[in-house]
Image: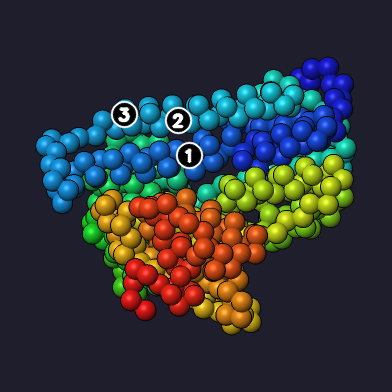
């Protein structure tokens, strides 16, 4: 039954409250717009609830447990170290609750109206928002679609209690004894590492010849070596064929380099990518153009072919990164306000919270050469850094990609501890047009991992101090 459906009028309607949607709503409100945000699930979307945040909490717990058991080199020997996984999950949930509550508080503090329900486009200027009890029409001047993405389900691997996606992997009741991970991308590798650190026997089935295909082979190898040391087994060029559920686990059949193999485990985790959530909101009703994959086409201001409809985040081209969605959300809100903001992905970082971490920004060496640049690629190892040695974390390196003619920094890659933090300085260097000399002349604190950035810049200049040229 429809209850009193008198249309509500708003300036900007945002569909989805993930890191793209809630940021867009707040920025639009800051720019003087009357804003309503619609969310059918939990505030904060996938990232805060079943993605970025809870996975990093689980990864951190895995590190703590692994370090407690394996710090003999530093003279620390712990006996009877155990995991109370129920307590781990409670702690993880408390982290999520703080952040989702914080998002709701920020929206309310910026006078953004929060509406619960599913939105469906009725026209280019209106949606119907429905919940279990009622439906309400909202008329808007502009709309920002930020509906995110969903894990892909592959044929023969229907999700169950034993065949799980990333959401299921984050909600397990116990630490599995054995787990098969299908897909060696960033989600699969992060979760494989987390559970391996907690004692799970993990087998990763990867269809190509390399895990973490979006990163340079040298970087992926650093992670692969560490995971193998922690007992993770890799099967490259492996095609998952099917899964059979047993009384208390699964049997996964895969074709590995042309030969059929069967892997038994407690759980099968499928991480082969995500698909955009664009098929059930009525985009075809208003003529919004999408690709055959359901990706929404946008211009440099995140505007679709329908001039007052904008799209951001996982539903548009590019990697499904939370910080990309937030960035695009600000651009869309500013464009609606009449500002000249445009998207520029030159220095958007990509990070994997693997063991050790990987991070990349700007051009890789190969990409720079393909783009016609004459470049210098300068590497500095973590093993030559005092802070890394004192942390007993010496795997990895930094690579700086600079233009040969003037030393302009156009890219950087980091494989090592705290790569996710270190990449920020390099992104700033690219955005501001810094050269290797600018970085080398910036005094970095000692002893710190940040010095590696300075040292890599000195390598680019041909004057390294702490490695022999």
Q: Is mark 1 on a helix, strand or loop?
A: helix
Tell me the residue at 58%/47% (across/down): 322
Residue name at image x 70 percent, y 49 percent: 328
Name the front one of labels 2 and 3: 2
| Residue 214 can be seen in this image | no
| Numbered label tally | 3
Q: Earlier in the sequence, mark 2 or mark 3?
A: 3
User: What residue sits right under mark 1 in the picture?
Assistant: 53
Specify which label sits upstream in the sequence, 2 or 1.
1
Q: Which of 96 and 264 is in front in this view?
A: 96
Q: Position of residue 43 (x, y in %)?
A: 60, 30
Disc 3 to disc 1, how far (Cα)? 18 Å
Is disc 2 placed on a helix, strand or loop?
Answer: helix
| Quadrant hosting residue 156 | bottom left
Q: How crowded is mark 3: few (under 14 residues within 10 Å), some or many (20 or more)?
A: few
Left or right of residue 285: residue 457: left
Residue position for label 3: 86
């Amino acid at each position: 039954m429809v209850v009193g459906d008198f249309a509500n009028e708003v300036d900007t309607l945002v569909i989805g409250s993930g890191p793209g949607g809630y940021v867009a709503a707040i920025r639009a409100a800051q720019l003087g717009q009357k804003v309503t945000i619609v969310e059918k699930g939990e505030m904060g979307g996938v990232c805060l609830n079943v993605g970025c945040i809870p996975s990093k909490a689980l990864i951190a717990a895995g590190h703590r447990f692994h370090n407690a058991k394996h710090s003999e080199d530093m003279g620390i020997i712990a006996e009877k170290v155990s995991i109370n996984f129920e307590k781990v999950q409670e702690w993880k949930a408390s982290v999520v609750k703080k952040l989702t509550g914080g998002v709701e508080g920020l929206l309310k503090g910026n006078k953004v109206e929060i509406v619960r329900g599913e939105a469906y486009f009725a026209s280019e200027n209106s949606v119907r928002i429905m919940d279990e009890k009622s439906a309400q029409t909202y008329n808007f001047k502009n709309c920002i679609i930020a509906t995110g993405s969903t894990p892909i389900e592959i044929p023969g691997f229907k999700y169950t209690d034993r065949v799980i996606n990333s959401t299921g992997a984050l909600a397990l009741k116990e630490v599995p004894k054995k787990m098969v991970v299908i897909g060696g991308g960033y989600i699969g590798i992060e979760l494989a590492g987390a559970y391996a650190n907690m004692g799970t026997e993990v087998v990763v089935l990867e269809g190509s010849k390399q895990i973490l295909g979006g990163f340079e082979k040298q970087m992926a190898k650093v992670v692969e070596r560490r995971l193998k040391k922690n007992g993770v087994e890799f099967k490259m060029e492996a095609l998952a064929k099917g899964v059979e559920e047993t009384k208390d686990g699964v049997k996964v059949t895969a074709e590995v380099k042309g030969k059929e193999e069967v892997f038994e485990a407690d759980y099968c985790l499928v991480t082969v990518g995500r698909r955009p959530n664009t098929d059930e909101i009525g985009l075809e009703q208003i003529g919004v153009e999408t690709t055959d994959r359901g990706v929404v086409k946008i211009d440099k201001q995140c505007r679709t072919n329908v001039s007052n409809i904008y799209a951001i985040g996982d539903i548009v081209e590019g990697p499904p990164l939370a910080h990309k969605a937030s960035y695009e959300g600000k651009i869309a809100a500013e464009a609606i306000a009449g500002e000249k903001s445009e998207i520029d992905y030159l220095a958007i970082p990509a990070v994997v919270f693997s063991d050790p971490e990987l991070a990349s920004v700007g051009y890789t060496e190969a990409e720079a050469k393909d783009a016609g640049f004459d470049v210098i690629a300068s590497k500095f190892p973590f093993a030559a850094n005092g802070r890394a040695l004192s942390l007993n974390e010496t795997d990895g390196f930094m690579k700086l990609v600079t233009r040969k003619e003037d030393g302009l920094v156009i890219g950087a890659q980091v494989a090592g501890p705290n790569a996710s933090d270190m990449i920020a300085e390099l992104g700033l260097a690219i955005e501001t047009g810094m050269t290797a000399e600018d970085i080398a002349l910036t005094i970095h604190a000692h002893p710190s991992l940040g010095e590696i950035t300075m040292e890599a810049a000195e390598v680019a200049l041909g004057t390294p101090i702490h490695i022999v040229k």
